[in-house]
Image (cartoon, rainbow, N blue to C red):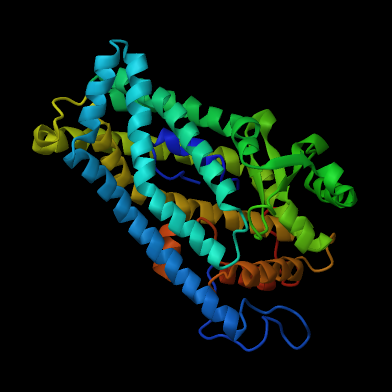
Amino acid sequence: MNKVAGILCCLVFLGLPFLQGQQAPIVKSPLPDSATSHSGKITGYTLPSDLYRKARNRGRISFASRVFGQFYGVWILWFLLQRKTATRYRDWAERATRKRFVQAFIFAPLLLFTIALLQLPLDIFREAVLRSYGISVQSWASWAADWTKSGLLTMLAGGLLVWILYAMIRWSPRYWWFYSWIIAVPLIAFVFYISPYVVEPLFYEFAPLSAKAPELIPAIQRVMQKAGQNIPEDHMFWMKASDKTIATNAYVSGFGSSKRVVIWDTTLARETQDETLMDFGHELGHYVLRHILKGMIFLDAMVLALLYLVYRCIGWLLEKRGAGWGIHALDEWASLPALMLLLTLFGFAADTAGNAYRRYLENQADIYSLEINHGIVADPGQAMAHGFQKSGETVFEDPEPNRVRVFLFYDHPPVVDRIHLFVTYDPWSKGESPQFVK
């Protein structure tokens, strides 16, 4: 599923990460050859010794970075509260104007920009790691431009959301959490809807898939005909990712009339037609199985739970610490970092639950692709396994991911688990009924 939409969706959480199978034996040691049997068929995800060491190191670095990032994010908010940074920004905004709408667009961008600057060293480190492994090929100037655009979007949307939140707090001190959720529900749908039109083009170049890969369209149409779907050609897009990464990918984004399937140019360049069809089948699975709608409903439920938990705890927190932070009441702008601190703490558990749910949806989409391409692709399981094996070797996917890391941070099943599914899922030979494509 699309990740760019998360830039705006995270604003619903005032800066928290966006909320979006079958288990397999874990490879215990590297093999000297690629993950193929003597017949040339892939039997599991393994890596040659040199790639294995790189993949394991990258996995450890990524895990450490994510864990550190969680604690660092909490520390930033605590630091800003201790330094009374938000209090100063509140005073500046209130001295500048008496209009609360304008105050919100002074206070919120200042606070969000300060947080972004404090997060910048970690962002640079993560990008440097990707560059050191050759995964990111984006220039630093381009990366800085993307970082700036993301920040401007966050500050613009953040000002509006902060104004709405505090309007609800002032209007209904007891039920602001519920009324804020009522407003958040259509906002989440709106973010999903506009992302393909407004957000994604700011970061990537798009073109009709029929113009960039016309030879792929007849094969895609055969898959859609079997699925009983009619995705218009103008809803299938090519995306230029090769100027930023060597990774391959495809995704579904949008909602309602804006819903679309996107295939990266790196995917088209590095994968065979059968492998690309399997990618398309996976994304078609998200389409057919209504994963966008289900994801939105799940996200709505998480937002409601988070807002209620924050409501239950914010009074206690401000009673204990508010005076020392220069915060006298919840309805003043300076309380925002305290709200964000609670959202971050509770949001970690919510994001973990969201990742588990997304892994479940991605597993369903994998199975759907295997089923819908059965009889169209010569060997769907091997085609999908080969694609993921090549991708894993290219971007150093860890063949032995730490299960704690998977539980906490993976929003897709690990590659080792996915390839195991691809090479073992065969209900037809067992006389069983497929799950989705009967």
Q: In terms of depth relative to the viewer, which is nearer, 381 or 335?
A: 335
Q: Is residue 64 visible?
A: yes
Label tally? 0
Q: Is residue 205 left or right of residue 218?
A: left
Q: Is residue 225 left or right of residue 235?
A: right
Residue 209 location in percent, x, y?
Answer: 80, 44
Q: In terms of depth relative to the viewer, which is nearer, 373 or 96?
A: 96
Q: Quadrant of the C terminus?
A: bottom right
* Residue located at (32% from left, 45% from top): 344
Up-down relation of residue 380 to residue 277 (above or below): below
Q: In terms of depth relative to the viewer, which is nearer, 388 or 63?
A: 63
Residue 50 location in percent, x, y?
Answer: 58, 83
* Residue located at (84% from left, 67% from top): 378
Residue 328 location in percent, x, y?
Answer: 13, 26
* Residue located at (56% from left, 80% from top): 52
Q: Is residue 179 visible?
A: no
Residue 282 location in percent, x, y?
Answer: 69, 54
Q: Residue furthest front?
A: 141
* Residue located at (56% from left, 85% from top): 30
Up-down relation of residue 190 to residue 433 (above or below): above
